[in-house]
Image (cartoon, rainbow, N blue to C red):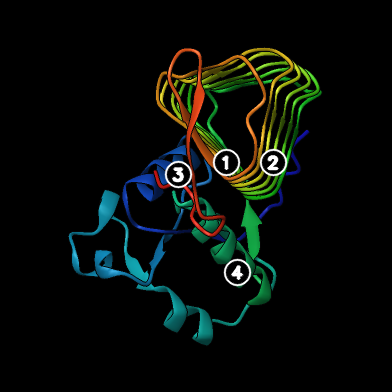
Amino acid sequence: MIMMVKLKTIYVYGAGGHGKVVADVLRAARRPPAGFLDDSAFRCRVPPLGLPVLDARQWMSRIEVCGEIGVALGIGDNRARQEVADLCRCSGFKIVTAVHPAAVLSTAARIGAGTVVMPLAVVNADARLGEGVIINTGAVIEHDCVVGDYAHISPNAVLGGRVHVGSFSHLGLGAAVLPGVCIGSRSIIGAGAVVVRDIPDDVVAMGVPARVSKRVCSKVSAST
């Protein structure tokens, strides 16, 4: 179930590659953004998709928020995406959920605020996606899966039924997780890995079958 709030204006926070894709998703969904917000060197480059790039902090400090301005999360880094969402909420902006019309979503699925679902992704019955999740191009989230807040499921990754992915975790390109397996929070699953047993918090796992290769600092999250 998705609650779409009608907003006067939408901006995408983040003018990098992931932000451009989020903007394209909004365009396809007939919710075209007015521009990008960014606080990095991207502001000095050619405007992506022909849209203006505004200094995020400066603009947010000057704009009068009336509950009609929304911000979509165009940040690929999981932890940074949460920080941006918190900043936007504190500043009075609505956090926008973006779903491409070419994605397939069950009417029984639940999707949190700020989540982005890319084209050709599938989210099946009774799946639950947290806040700020990225379900990237062609990913499959099977029935009864739970994907925690600010996790990232990369292109062509597949979660079998009843899989649980913890908050801030990142599944790499083409990774597959067998039904009923749990992946902890803040963990990274390598590209092409096949996860056949539970993976704990704060680790990197890779290979077929996936094995833990090292631990990661809990403050470090995966980037796009």
Three-letter amino acid code of the residue under disc 1? Ser
Q: Which residue is mark 4?
A: 88
Q: Is residue 113 left or right of residue 126?
A: left
Q: Are marks 1 and 2 in contact (CB under 8 Å)?
A: yes
Residue occupying the point 71% across, 42% down = 130
Please, what secondary structure does the residue beneath circle 3 have? helix
Q: Which residue is mark 2?
A: 148
Residue occupying the point 41% across, 47% down = 223
Q: Which residue is mark 1?
A: 169
Quadrant for residue 103, please give it: top right
Judge whether 166 appears above or below 173 on screen: below
State the image coordinates of residue 137 (x, y, percent, origin top left): 45, 26
Judge whether 181 appears above or below 91 on screen: above
Q: Which mark is residue 154?
A: none
Residue occupying the point 54% across, 59% down = 219
Separation of marks 1 and 2 at Cα, in angstroms: 8 Å
Three-letter amino acid code of the residue under disc 3? Val
> Mark 3 vs mark 2: which is more N-terminal?
3
Please, what secondary structure does the residue beneath circle 4 have? helix
Residue occupying the point 28% across, 49% down = 49
